[in-house]
Amino acid sequence: MSDTLHVLLAPHRHAQDIRKSRFLAQAAPVSSVEQAMAFLQEVADLAATHNCWAYRIGQDYRFNDDGEPGGTAGRPILQAIEGAGIDRAMVVVTRWYGGIKLGAGGLVRAYGGTAAECLRLAEREPLVAMVRLSVHCPFADLALLKARCPAWQARIEHESFDAEGATLELELPADQREEACARIVDLTRGQARLRA
């Protein structure tokens, strides 16, 4: 696993047949437990034998074997997420039993392998650490400041006004913060007030 974590760009699916059982892995980017559980509800097939799953969102993780023997499904899916260096993802592996028992080792390989292959094929991008920055500036500098936000990959999360000017709540990559602060001070001739 590389040191750089990645996030999925879009949901992805991968299916394979293993000894007459059908396995379908479905992965999606998620940023909250609520999103992960909503994805599970969306893709789980109630007619299937098992809908096993795992998610990792930062330091939070959870997995579920959905009736398979303990440790043979959910944990291997979580290990596939971690092994792929993926964060903020939910993976659901659905199994339709085909009549041949796989044994504990076979289940671990089937669930973990299907999840790993799904994640390997999914589109991804490096996870960028984001920071928030609050900027209060005079009205005269507002348009120029807003026009420069794309150069720092900054997104305006909220905007409010008072008698002296405007406050912009920005979200931007952590590695752009120092540059953005220096440019904001320059653009406003020192009139802007910055708060992290």
Image (cartoon, grey):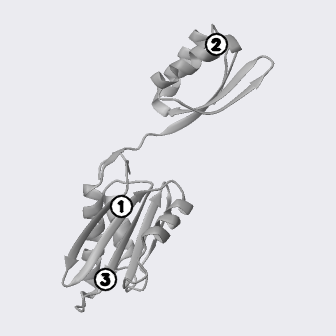
Q: Is residue 101 above or below residue 13?
A: below
Q: Is residue 182 above or below residue 15?
A: above
Residue type at tag 2:
Asp
- Is residue 30 or residue 73 the one in the foreground? 30
Discs 1/3, front: 3
Query: In what quadrant of the picture does the C terminus appear?
Result: top right
Q: In the rendering, at what x and y percent does residue 89 appear?
A: 42, 58
- Residue sitting farthest toward the top: 189
Residue indicated by mark 2: 141
Q: Quadrant of residue 92?
A: bottom left
Describe residue 79's horizontal placement relative to residue 157 as left or right. left
Residue type at tag 1:
Ile
Discs 2/1, front: 2
* Secondary structure at numbered mark 2: helix
Residue indicated by mark 3: 96
CA separation, marks 3 and 2?
Answer: 61 Å
The mark that comes first in sequence, 3 or 2, is 3
Check residue 35 in the rendering and tell me which mark sits there, or answer none.
none
* Secondary structure at numbered mark 3: strand
Q: In the rendering, at what x and y percent does residue 121 appear?
A: 25, 56
Q: Is residue 110 above or below residue 117?
A: below
- Is residue 69 or residue 7 the one in the foreground? 7
Check residue 81 in the rendering and tell me which mark sits there, or answer none.
1
* Secondary structure at numbered mark 1: helix
Q: In the rendering, at what x and y percent does residue 11 appear?
A: 37, 57
| Residue found at x 54% / y 57% | 32
- Residue sitting farthest toward the right: 163
Residue type at tag 3:
Trp
